[in-house]
Each structure stands twice: as C-alpha cells, then as structure tokens.
Image (spheres, grey):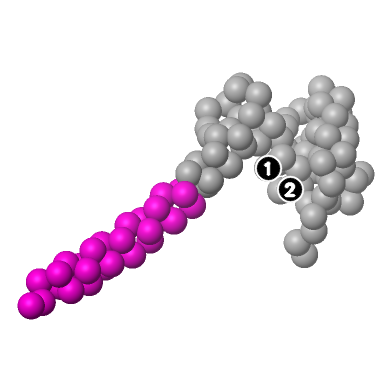
Amino acid sequence: MNRKYSPEMRERALRVFAEARPEHPNMMSAVRHVAGLLGMSPETLRLWRRRYEVDAGTKPGVSTDAAQRIKQLEKEVSELRKANEILKAASVFFAKELDRP
C-alpha cells in the first residue's frame, strides 16, 4: 500500500528513530522497532533516514534540492528543444516560400 505521509510525520519518525537508535544493536533493528511503533513500513523509514543523511551532507548522493533543480532544468531543456524544432520547421517553410518565383 502506497501512503503519503505529512512532513510532520516524517520529522517525528526521524526524531523517534534518533532517540531509539542507541538502544538497539544495529540500525535495522531500530528501524523495524520504530516503524512498528508508528505503523509504517520499515523500508519507508529507512529511505527517509537515508534521504535525511544525504540532505545533511553526511552521506554521498544528490540532495533533494539538487534533484528538484535537475528535474526543473531537464523540463526546461525539453521545452527549448521542442521550440527549436518548431523554429527549424518554420524557417524551412519560409525559406521555400522565398525561393518561389
């Protein structure tokens, strides 16, 4: 089941995880414990923790802000390529019109 969680829920889950982590022998046991308490998938909590670490700069990876900027730039590039194709087609059309006697 795919659920959307609020940003507040994400912050709360990460805070509870940070508090519970020292009591567990490894990270995954802490993730499973906290996820069970909050009624969510352990994988969801694990991914949130990973994203938090990347955004904080403690783990390598593309931050959320950078990923959003890349997505925005890719969309802009796509739109500009379409505009270029339209302009090329228009220039060919008008060049043919000018060549006619």
The percent position of residue 87, horizontal first and vertical second, equals 31, 61
Q: Nearer the viewer, residue 55 or 36?
A: 55
In this figure, which residue is indicated by the disc labeled 1?
47
Q: Is residue 96 above or below residue 1?
A: below
Seen as rendered, the residue at the extreme front is 101
Q: Give me the residue at 68% from left, 42% from top.
A: 47
Magenta residues, as a range?
74-101
In this figure, which residue is indicated by the disc labeled 2?
44
In the structure shown, which secondary structural element does the residue marked by tag 2 occupy? helix
Q: Give me the residue at 10% from left, 77% from top.
A: 100
Q: Is residue 35 above or below residue 60?
A: below
In the structure shown, which secondary structural element does the residue marked by tag 1 occupy? helix
The percent position of residue 52, horizontal first and vertical second, equals 69, 32
The percent position of residue 21, horizontal first and vertical second, equals 80, 27
**Label 1 to label 2, Cα distance in Å?**
5 Å
Tell me which secondary structure the magenta stretch mostly adopts. helix
